[in-house]
């Protein structure tokens, strides 16, 4: 009994010490921003400053914070390492862990904003996913970099500085999840990666920039398009994984049997990255119609970087049982369809989601 009381006392003492150490150096007048690090080029390193090849996800979050002069004057910044992967290896499992952690942190009065460091390859998908499942209007900002931390003119530290400045600002509340890169503020709904290697890679072709940022000073131009965060009907309560949705890319004479192969492998939804206005060849359209008749949800998106995919334009969606992606590209259509399939929904209901989010 005595030993038991002693060990309880020592646990309490250790916890108090941990809490006071954590609070040491915190400025009560500054907002509290948590950086959730997932990896990517911003945490990448190469053997030399001018080497094109490098390995993503090498540098830990504490080292990244230390590399940004002035960041601790913007906010009380705390880092947590959630994963350390190149974003080509981002996964549904990490998404769920990330979203749950964000919701848990933002539910407390102690956290004012979140920054997520992330590879750029799939950043738009993660941002859009979070935009649909985060249950708070507090700022949530993703950032990354195109150049690894060891490169000449690595832009990661300034991107991180700008992201923290925005996450610390109450004016960033209610904008949904934001992507901050290269002095620009994008909405999760609108943003897409457009260049494989340039630091100016993110663009928002349909709605334009949400705002701009220069050395932490920032301005918002307009509200993001689409319903998000606190108004979103999606929830991850009790969710441990997402239904499989595959993307089938359209091209001249592209094979239709990929659709059947996907369904046989367990896909419950198919997104067509179609040609033009979500078009596809006759064989692919026939395969989509057949799949839709069996209850598979088939969304027509496009491989074209900008523009709407219109319902009942060149393809008769009513007749084929297909869904038009409206303004979502194929990779974001896949995110929305995975979340939509968490519940039994009619084709009409899924179409409504594509007009809404
Ligand atoms: N493949 C890397 C990633 O997405 C490179 C892109 C980047 O972070 O810039 O993590």
Image (tube, helix red, strand yellow):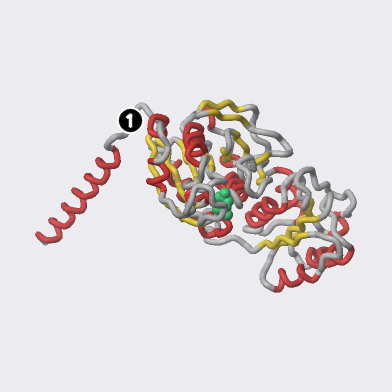
Percent across and percent down for residue 351 are: 75, 50
Q: Secondary structure at mark 1?
A: loop
Q: Residues within 10 Å of mark 1 (few under 14, many from 20)?
A: few
Relative to 101, residue 282 above or below: below
Relative to 25, residue 326 above or below: below
**Rendered residue at 68%/53% (across/down):** 331
Relative to 207, residue 304 above or below: below
Q: Nearer the viewer, residue 171 or 341?
A: 171
**Rendered residue at 70%/34% (across/down):** 208
Q: Quadrant of residue 203?
A: top right
Which residue position holds label 1? 27
From the image, which quarter does the N terminus lie in?
bottom left
Does the image show residue 107? yes
Is residue 251 left or right of 269 when viewed as pictured? right
Q: Is mark 1 within 8 Å of ligand 1?
A: no
Is residue 151 left or right of 111 when viewed as pictured? right
Is residue 207 left or right of 113 when viewed as pictured? right
**Rendered residue at 47%/47% (across/down):** 150
Does the image show residue 119? no
Percent across and percent down for residue 12 are: 20, 50
Q: Nearer the viewer, residue 234 or 224?
A: 224
Q: Quadrant of residue 245?
A: bottom right
């Amino acid at each position: 009994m005595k030993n038991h009381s002693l060990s309880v006392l020592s646990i309490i003492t250790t916890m108090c010490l941990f809490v006071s150490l954590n609070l040491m150096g915190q400025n009560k007048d500054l907002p509290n921003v948590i950086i959730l690090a997932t990896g990517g080029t911003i945490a990448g390193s190469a053997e030399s400053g001018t080497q094109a090849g490098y390995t993503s996800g090498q540098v830990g979050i504490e080292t990244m914070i230390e590399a940004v002069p002035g960041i601790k004057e913007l906010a009380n910044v705390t880092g947590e390492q959630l994963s350390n992967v190149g974003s080509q290896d981002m996964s549904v499992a990490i998404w769920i862990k990330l979203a749950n952690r964000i919701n848990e942190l933002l539910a407390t009065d102690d956290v004012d904003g979140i920054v997520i460091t992330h590879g750029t390859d799939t950043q738009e998908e993660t941002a859009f996913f979070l935009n649909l499942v985060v249950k708070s209007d507090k700022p949530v900002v993703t950032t990354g970099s195109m150049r690894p931390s060891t490169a000449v003119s690595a832009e990661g530290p300034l991107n991180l500085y700008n992201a923290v400045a925005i996450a610390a600002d109450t004016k960033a509340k209610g904008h949904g999840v934001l992507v901050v890169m290269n002095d620009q503020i994008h909405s999760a709904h609108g943003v897409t990666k457009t260049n494989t290697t340039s630091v100016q890679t993110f663009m928002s072709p349909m709605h334009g920039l949400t705002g701009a940022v220069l050395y932490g000073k920032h301005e918002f131009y307009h509200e993001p398009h689409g319903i998000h965060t606190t108004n979103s009907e999606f929830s991850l309560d009790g969710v441990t994984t997402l239904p499989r949705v595959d993307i089938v890319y359209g091209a001249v004479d592209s094979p239709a049997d990929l659709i059947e192969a996907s369904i046989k492998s367990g896909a419950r939804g198919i997104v067509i990255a179609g040609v033009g206005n979500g078009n596809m060849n006759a064989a692919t359209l026939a395969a989509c119609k057949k799949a839709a008749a069996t209850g598979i949800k088939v969304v027509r998106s496009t491989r074209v970087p900008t523009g709407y995919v219109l319902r009942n334009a060149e393809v008769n969606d009513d007749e084929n049982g297909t869904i038009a992606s409206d303004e979502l590209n194929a990779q974001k259509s896949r995110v929305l369809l995975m979340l939509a399939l968490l519940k039994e929904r009619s084709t009409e209901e899924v179409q409504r989601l594509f007009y809404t989010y």
